[in-house]
Image (cartoon, rainbow, N blue to C red):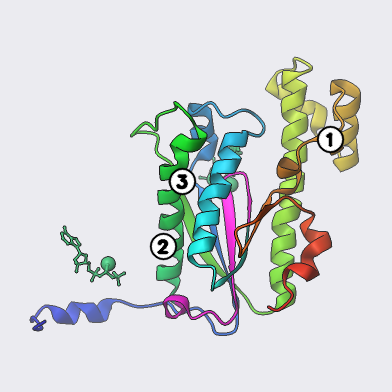
Amino acid sequence: MAKSRFEYVREFESHDVLLPQCYIVVRIDGKKFHEFSKYYEFAKPNDDRALKLMNAAAKNVVLQYRNDVILAYGESDEYSFILKSDTSLFNRRRDKISSLFVSLFTSNYVTLWPKFFVGVELHPKHLPFFDSRCVQYPNLKAIKDYLSWRFVDTHINNLYNTAFWKLIQVCGMNPREAENRLSGTYSSGKQEILFKDCGINYNNEPEMYKKGSLITRKGEILHIDVIKMIDDLFVGF
Ligand code: ATP
Ligand code: ATP
Ligand code: MG
Ligand code: MG
Ligand code: MG
Ligand code: MG
């Protein structure tokens, strides 16, 4: 195509290229999902439909970029896609990677919504959208620690949320009372409160809630102890 005299404006575009040899994490997170989950009446603390929808959308992203992705890990309204350190996807351009992953995820989320939220229509004023960032990790230890960090976060959040909501749903407390009951407690204390006050053994809660969801390059969705498996998960990478 012939160049116009306006063409020079292109030179103002800058491309942030991610460092070579670094693992890349694309982490996406639902925008205001606290409100979104209220509007669509998600079951608390964990709505199965919503978690499975997140997994299905993420699985399609993994499969589309299976040559570049090592694995993906998700909990709540977030997903992390871990890319190979030597990936040349989009010439490692940050904007391209971040924006294409999150828009592919979002279009899958919206398209798959009716399959998981049967009979629930998305309202134009309450549409799901996600933020996205690329983070670079310089070595295998750092990327394993990243995944472990998200896994521990899942555990801490889920234990708190489970105890909080069961105190409300089973013991009839109001949110303030539940918060007070849990304040200053450690993990073991929360598990004890759950057991003694609510008759719930945390160990028997669904694995997907406790452990989050891990998606392999083949598209398998696993709910496993990431920390125990961490070395196996990165064999060959
Ligand atoms: P931000 O826009 O800053 O991310 P947010 O409201 O999305 O704000 P998060 O810290 O991302 O805040 O938390 C997501 C919230 O979405 C959770 O606290 C929870 O209330 C809700 N949520 C997400 N997934 C589920 C689910 N499967 N079941 C029930 N609630 C969920
Ligand atoms: P890339 O992924 O690099 O952007 P691309 O195939 O999207 O590749 P573009 O330069 O963005 O390439 O061009 C978009 C192409 O999409 C156009 O060349 C045209 O073929 C097609 N297209 C987009 N909008 C329309 C439209 N409204 N009607 C017909 N064709 C369209
Ligand atoms: Mg957030
Ligand atoms: Mg969020
Ligand atoms: Mg979140
Ligand atoms: Mg295009």
Where residue 16 appears, x then y in whole percent?
Answer: 42, 77
Give the mark nearer the N terminus: 2 vs 3. Answer: 2
Residue closer to the observer: 165 or 82: 82
Residue 190 visible in rendering: no
Q: CA distance from mark 2 to mark 3?
A: 15 Å
Q: Which residue is mark 1?
A: 204
Q: Which residue is mark 2?
A: 99
Mark nearest the camera among 2 and 3 is: 3
Where residue 192 appears, x then y in whole percent?
Answer: 91, 32
The amino acid type, in three-letter code, at marker 3 is Tyr
The residue that appears at 86% across and 42% down in the rendered structure is 187
Residue 71 in which image quadrant? bottom right
Ligand 4 located in image quadrant: top right
Q: Is residue 184 magenta?
A: no
Q: Is residue 82 above or below residue 22?
A: above
Residue closer to the observer: 116 or 83: 116
Residue 221 visible in rendering: yes
Q: Secondary structure at mark 3?
A: helix
Placement of the N terminus among the 4 image quadrants: bottom left
User: Which span of residues is magenta-colored?
Assistant: 73-92
The residue that appears at 78% across and 69% down in the rendered structure is 232
Q: Which residue is mark 3?
A: 109
Mark nearest the camera among 1 and 2 is: 1
Give the mark nearer the N terminus: 3 vs 1. Answer: 3
Q: Is residue 88 magenta?
A: yes
Q: CA distance from mark 1 to mark 2?
A: 38 Å
